[in-house]
Image (tube, coloured by chain):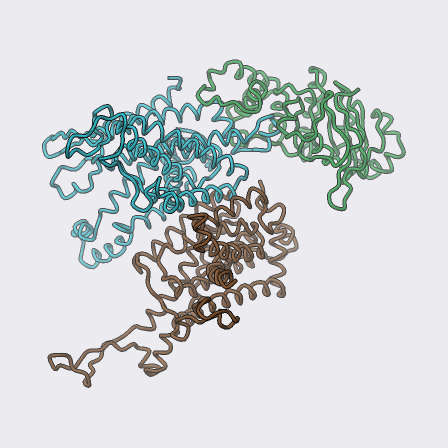
Amino acid sequence: MGLNKKDFTLLIIVAILCVFAPFILNPFPEGSAMAQFNAGYPDLMQRLVIFGIFAIGFNILFGLTGYLSFGHAAFLGVGSYAAIWMMKLLTMNVIPAIIISVLVAGLFSLLVGWISLRRSGIYFSILTLAFAQMSYSLAYSVLTPITGGETGLQPKVNDPRILDGALAAGETPRANLFGLQMNQSYEMAVGNWVFTFNAGYYLAAIVMLIAFYISIRIFRSPFGMMLRAVKSNQQRLNYTGLNAKPYTLAAFVISGMYAGLAGGLLVAMDTQVGAERMFWTASGEVVLMTILGGAGTLIGPVLGAGFIKYMENIVSKINKSILEQWFAFMPDGIEDLLITLVYPFIGKGWHLTLGILFMLVVIFLPGGLVEGGQRVGRLFKRKKPADDKPDGKTTPAE
Amino acid sequence: MDAIILQILNGLDKGSAYALIALGLTLIFGTLGVVNFAHGALFMIGAFCAVTLSRILTLSHTVIDETQKDFLGNPLKVDVPYIYDIFGQATGDAIIDWAVPISILFAIPVMVGIGFAMERGLIKHFYKRPHADQILVTFGLAIVLQEIIKYFYGANPIPTPAPDAFRGSFDFGAMLGFDPNTIIYPYWRLVYFAFAAVIIGAVFAFLQFTTFGMVVRAGMADRETVGLLGINIDKRFTIMFGIAAAVAGLAGVMYTPINSPNYHMGMDFLVLSFVVVVVGGMGSLSGAVLAGFLLGILESFASMAIVLETLPGINQIIIYLVAIIILLTRPRGLMGRKGVMEE
Amino acid sequence: MGILEVKNVGKRFGGLQALGDVNLSIAENSVHAIIGPNGAGKSTLLNCLVGKLIPDTGSVMFDGQSVLGRKPYEINQMGISRVFQTPEIFADLSVMENMMIPCFAKRDGAFQLNALSSIPSQRDMIERAEHMLEDMNMADKRAMHAGSLSRGDKRRLEIGMCLSQEPRLLLLDEPTAGMARADTNNTIDLLKQISEDRDITIAIIEHDMHVVFSLAERITVLAQGTPLVEDTPDNIKGNPKVREAYLGETQDAA
C-alpha cells in the first residue's frame, strides 16, 4: 500500500468506523425516547462520508498550502450538475456520473485556479469567493437551460438515457450501480434495535476510503512536502529553484476534483441538484469542517465533517419538551433557568452553537479537534513539561 | 439620456451602502491590518437598531376605552403606546413615524460600544496572527452575531418604513426638463444618498483636519514608525474601530426603509463590499468610496432591459466580473497603494 | 572571462539612482566580496543578480547566458543559489525535510507532480540529504523543527540547503549579520572549508571586515552605486580612497 505503519493503522480505523457506522450511529433502541437521536439512517450517513470527502479535498489545498479558498462549493455544484446530466443523457448507473463529475469539476477548478492563483492572501480568498458567487448567480439565471434555475434538475422519465433500456410503465428512473439501487437498504433487527445497511452509503464510504487513502499518499509524497514548503516560505522556495505556481495550482485542482467527487456522490445518493449548494455559505461550511477538525492534519477534516453533520442532526432535533424531560429532576426554578439558558443553542439555534464552537477553536485550538485530542492525550501521558510546549503549528500528524 | 440618469440614480443608494461598508472595512484594514469578515454583521445590527427602537417606541399598555364598544357592547380594550402618555398623541405619532431617523441617535452609542467590545475583546488578540486566522475568527463572529439576531427577531424580514413625509416618489425628470414620468425616484433613496455623502464627508474631514485623524493616517501609512514616536496608537485604533462600526451601523439604520432587514442581510452585503474594497484598492479610503459608487451604478446599468437583452444575466455577475478583471490587470485595485497586502 | 559578468548595470528607484554603472567580473572558483557603506547599492546589485529586480540598463551574464528577465527560480536552476541576511528556511518543516527539498529541486526541476510516490521510497534523495546534514554537522538535529533551531544553526542549514543543489555560484548576503562572535567564526570556517572542498564560486556581501578579510580573494568596493575599486584584500586595506569612503568610518570593526 505504500503507507507507513501509523498511517496504515489510521486508514484501517477509519475503514472499521465506516463499516460499522450503521451500528455506531444507532445506539438507542427503537421506540425509546432517545431513538430520535439515532443517526444511523441512510441519508445522514451518506452525507457524513460525502462531506468528509469534500473536506479531505479542501484540506489538501488549505491545510497544506495555506491558501484559503472561499469558493469551493462551486466545484461541488458543478460536479453535481455534471453528474445529473450523465443520468439524464447516458445512464442511471452512477459510475459515469461520478467520473464525469470529477472531470468537469477538475476542468472548472483549473480555470478558476489558474486565474485566482495569480494573487495570494486575502486577494486569493476574495477571487475564489467572487468566482463561486458568479457561478451561483449564473446557475440561477442565465444558465437555467443547463441548471434548471430555481427548480433545479432531476432525472425525468422521458430523458433520453441512451445506454439504459426503456423504463417499464410507471417506473421512475433510479440511481443504481449495475442494477443495485442506491436507495436499497437491508434492515436488521436485533432486539429492540434496528440497523439499516444502505447500498448508497456503502458505495459512498468505499469512495471516501479511497479518497482518504489518496490524501494520505499525497501528504506523505514529495509533492505534499513541497506544498507545505509553499505555506512555510515561498521566498525560500523560489530561491531553491522551485516554481510555487504549478504546485498550488495542482493542489487547487486536486481539491476541486475532490469537491466534484463529493458533488457527484450527492447526486448519486439523491438525484437532484439546485443552485443553492453553490452558495457561498456552503463554501464557508467546508472551511468550518476543515478548521474545526484540524487543518493540515490527515484525519481532521473527516472528523470535522462528521462532527458538524452529526451534531447538526442531533442538536437541531432537540426541542423544548426534550429539554424539559432532561432537566425534570431538578427543582422548578433551576429547571426553568437551565432551559432558558440552553434553549437558544439547540434546535434552530444550532448555527449559533456552531459559530461559537468555531470561534473557540480558531482562538484557542488552531489545530482543531485533532490538536485537542493530542493535548488531552498528553495530559494522560504525563510527559515532562519541557516536551509539551504548545507551538500552535499544524504539523501533519495523524 | 433620461434612462441613463435613472440608472445612475438607481445605482446611488446601493452604491452608498457599498461605499459606507467598504469605507469601514478599509478603515479597519488600513489602521489595524485586520480583515474583518464580521463587518457585514455590524451593518445588519445597525439595521436592527432601527427595528428595536421602533419596537420600543410602540411599546404599549392596554387601557379600556369607554367611548368605544365592541359588538357585545362592552367597553373596548385598546393598546396605547407609552409614548402617548409622555408626549401626547400627536407628538407621539410623529415620533413613531420618525423612528428610523431617530434610531441614528440610538444606534451611534450602541454601535460604538459594540465596536469597542469587539476590538478589545477579540480582534486585539489577532493582530499578530495570519490573515487567514483573522478571516476565520471574524467569520465565526459574523455567524454568531447573525444567529443571535435571528434568535431574538426571527428569520423573516421586518418591514420598517420611512417617515410619511419621505414615502412615495417624486418626478426627478420633470425637474430636469425631461418628459414627466420618465425619471421617478423615491424620496428616501435620495435621503439615503445625501446621508451617505454626509457621513463619508464627515469621516474624511475628521481624518484630514483633526490631530487624531492625522495620527491615524500616519499610522495607516506606517504603523511602526508612529508607534516609535511614543504615540499610543493602539488606543486610537480602538476608537477607529468604534467609528468604523458606527459607520456600518448607520448605513444599516438608514437602509431599513429600502430593504426590510433580515438577519442575513449583512453577509449578503459583506461579500459585495469586500469585492468593492478590493476593486478600490485595499487600504485606500477614497478608492473604497469611489469603487462603491462605481459598482453600485454599474450594477444598475447592467440591469437595464436593453443590456439584459444582449447580455442576459449580466446584472447578476457584473460586480464579480469587474473585480476579477481589475484584480488581474491592476492588482492593487483602482487606488491601492504599493506594499499593502502584497505577498 | 569570469563566471559572472556584470556590465554597465544601472537601476533607478524614482529619483534615486541606486546603481550607476556597475561593471563586475567574478572569476570562477574564487571568493569575491562586495563591500561598501550603507546605501551603496549592495543589496540592489544582489537583487539584480538573482532576478528579484530587473536593472534598467546593462547586462548580467552567468556562464555565458543572460539572467535578465528570468524568474528567481529559473536563475536558481541555472546554478546560482542565494543565502539571505536573515536565514530563509522552511520554519514549519523538519530539518531533514528542509534539506530534502533542494535535493528534489536539483533532481526534478522546478515542478514535478510526484503526488503518489512516498518520501521513504526516494532512497537516493534521503541519502543525499543525510550526507549534506553530516557535512553541516547537523545530523543529530535532523528530526527537529527547523523553526526551533538556533540562529547559527539556521544559517548552517540554509547554507547546506544551497550547497545541496550543487550551485556553481553561491551568493551570500551578510551571512553573519546579527551573529555572536563564536557563530561568526564558525560560519567563516564553514565557508572556507566549502570553498576549498568544492568547485564553487562564492560572492559575498558583507559589512563585517573581519569576515571579508578572512575569506575574500578579491574585493570590490561599492560606493554610491558605482564600484570604487576592485583589488586583493591587502591592496584594499592600503588604498586611501577606500579608507576615505568606507573604512574610515568602521576602523574599529576592521
The quadrant in which the N terminus of chain A is found is top left
Residue at the far right in the pictured view: C240
Residue at the far front in the pictured view: B179
Rendered cyan, the chain in question is A
Residue B98, percent from left and from top: 39, 74
Q: Is residue B247 above or below residue C218?
A: below
Chain C visual colour: green
Chain B visual colour: brown
Q: Looking at the picture, tell me which residue is in the foreground, A91 or B146.
A: A91
Residue A28, percent from left and from top: 16, 37
Q: Looking at the picture, tell me which residue is in the foreground, A70 or B115.
A: A70
Residue at the far left in the pictured view: A191
Residue B199, percent from left and from top: 52, 65
- Residue A107, image quadrant: top left
The quadrant in which the C terminus of chain A is found is top left
A132 relative position to B235: left or right: left
Is any part of residue A293 visible from this angle?
no
- Residue C6, image quadrant: top right
Q: Looking at the picture, tell me which residue is in the foreground, A198 or A99.
A: A99
- Residue A312, image quadrant: top left
Is any part of residue A333 visible from this angle?
yes
